[in-house]
Image: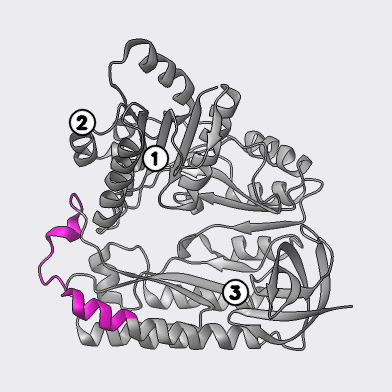
């Protein structure tokens, strides 16, 4: 039996597709092994969101070739969809599999192995294809939580982002296919579903379906205990949309709203399609409909031309909104994007200094959010066991994504547990006393 090893780089959508390719290879008779092992086939699902991601993609492909020079090395994903990627992969990868072609991986491997002629299979995503690539999962390693991809592509064209070129235009998955996959996952023990996509908020614009309708339908699937949402743009969070979510008991009040900057002039240079005032109004709307919801976001530090005053505006805005978590990124110049050619590129040292300020602010805000739950009654979905100072616990997350630990001498993963949060047990971990 031939051995195959897979390595994922990048976002949750990539992780989902890597897991789907793993299951396709298993079905085709491959034995799946660790990427560090000697294998007959290595699959690297690449990322191209930044220049650093491009470098990591090439690095992992070289590592596979070095591990077993006679193996079939497969480069898949976003990096191979870019012009730079296709040109730089000659001689590194035997098989190049673009986005929207991953479902053909076993057949493409068979084609290569019969001829030993390198195969390039890259979709013309920017030529107007409207086909959604149907990949699906039967189970996930964690069993508790499953990420389910429901949408691909993006039409936003933010000035720093290559993804619309690597992923193409928006394409939505049929609701009936999403529900069929979720029923299979539930049958295999999964209790929580996370709906994800490249631009999740655009779901249904190309098919006539709606994201709110999909969420309601997923919540209605028997056996699903929780539904969580991937990253959303502020524009989708209308009064109608938020109020529709608020009546769904299974919907987790955990919203990741992409921000990138808390300064309007920077947002304009980024070609983001909202203002800070509009974003703030969305956060107020969510807090009107949900009690103490978790609101998290992304922030890019050191975007071209960002002045001290503009950074100060971002810092003040973050403090005013009071996020649960910030995902902080130093701007990384990406060839092929408009931002790469903007003047006044910010020095790396200045980016690092500003990042440090935001990380410190993030720690303060996150601690404040978590401390709110001390003395409160919550329900946690348990995921894994751990040992702290010789004491055995089972850990899990509340709907708001607060990580809690429960004393447990027995295996109690994938269970819903109700109790009171008594205080902090370790960094980012709080003790839950069960009723």
Q: Which residue is mark 2?
A: 90
**Residue 398 appears in the picture as rendered:** no
Q: CA distance from mark 2 to mark 3?
A: 45 Å
Q: Which residues are magenta?
A: 335-355
State whether residue 240 is above or below residue 311. above
Q: Marks 2 and 1: CB-CB under 8 Å? A: no
Label 3, on which residue?
A: 294
Asked if residue 23 is among those painted magenta in the image, a careful observer would answer no
Characterize the local packing of mark 2: few (<14), some (14-19) or many (20 or more) Cα atoms within 10 angstroms.
few
Kind of element beneath mark 2? loop
Q: Nearer the viewer, mark 1 or mark 3?
A: 1
149 above or below 337? above
For this orientation, the residue located farthest to the right is: 435
Q: Secondary structure at mark 3?
A: strand
Residue 313 image offset from top left, x and y in percent: 31, 85
Instruction: Please state which of residues 111 and 342 is positioned toward the viewer in this rendering.
Output: 111
The residue to which callout 1 is attached is 44
Residue at 54% across / 26% down in the picture? 30
Please report contact status of discs 2 and 3: CB closer than 8 Å, yes or no: no
Q: Earlier in the sequence, mark 1 or mark 3?
A: 1
The image quarter containing residue 175 is: top right
């Amino acid at each position: 039996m031939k051995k195959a090893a897979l390595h994922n780089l990048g976002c949750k959508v990539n992780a989902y597709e890597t897991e789907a390719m793993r299951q396709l290879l298993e079905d085709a008779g491959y034995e799946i092994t660790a990427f560090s092992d000697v294998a007959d086939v290595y699959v690297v699902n690449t990322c191209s969101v930044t220049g650093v991601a491009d470098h990591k993609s090439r690095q992992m492909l070289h590592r596979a070739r070095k591990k077993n020079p006679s193996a079939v090395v497969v480069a898949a994903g976003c990096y191979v969809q870019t012009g730079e990627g296709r040109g730089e992969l000659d001689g590194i990868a035997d098989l190049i599999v673009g986005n929207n072609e991953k479902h053909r991986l076993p057949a493409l491997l068979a084609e290569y192995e019969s001829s030993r002629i390198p195969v390039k299979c890259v979709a013309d995503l920017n030529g107007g294809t409207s086909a959604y690539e149907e990949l699906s999962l039967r189970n996930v390693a964690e069993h508790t939580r499953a990420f389910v991809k429901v949408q691909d592509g993006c039409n936003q064209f933010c000035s720093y982002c290559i993804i619309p070129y690597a992923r193409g235009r928006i394409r939505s998955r049929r609701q009936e296919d999403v529900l069929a996959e979720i029923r299979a996952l539930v049958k295999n023990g999964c209790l929580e579903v996370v709906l994800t996509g490249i631009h999740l908020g655009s779901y249904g614009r190309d098919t006539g379906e709606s994201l709110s309708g999909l969420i309601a339908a997923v919540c209605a699937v028997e056996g699903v205990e929780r539904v969580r949402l991937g990253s959303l743009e502020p524009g989708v969070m209308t009064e109608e949309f938020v109020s529709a979510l608020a009546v769904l008991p299974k919907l987790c009040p955990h919203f990741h709203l992409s921000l990138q900057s808390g300064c309007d002039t920077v947002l304009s240079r980024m070609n983001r399609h909202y203002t800070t005032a509009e974003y703030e109004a969305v956060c107020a709307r969510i807090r009107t409909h949900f009690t103490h919801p978790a609101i998290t976001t992304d922030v890019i530090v050191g975007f071209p031309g960002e002045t001290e005053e503009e950074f100060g505006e971002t810092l003040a805005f973050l403090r005013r909104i009071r996020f649960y978590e910030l995902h902080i990124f130093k701007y990384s110049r990406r060839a092929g994007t408009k931002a790469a050619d903007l003047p006044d590129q910010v020095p790396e040292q200045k980016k690092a200094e500003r990042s440090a300020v935001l990380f410190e602010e993030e720690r303060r805000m996150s601690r404040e959010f978590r401390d709110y739950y001390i003395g409160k009654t919550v329900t946690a979905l348990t995921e894994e066991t751990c040992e702290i100072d010789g004491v055995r616990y089972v850990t899990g997350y509340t709907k708001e994504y607060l990580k809690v630990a429960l004393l447990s001498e027995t295996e109690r993963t994938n269970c819903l547990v109700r109790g009171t949060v008594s205080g902090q047990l370790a960094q980012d971990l709080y003790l839950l006393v069960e009723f």
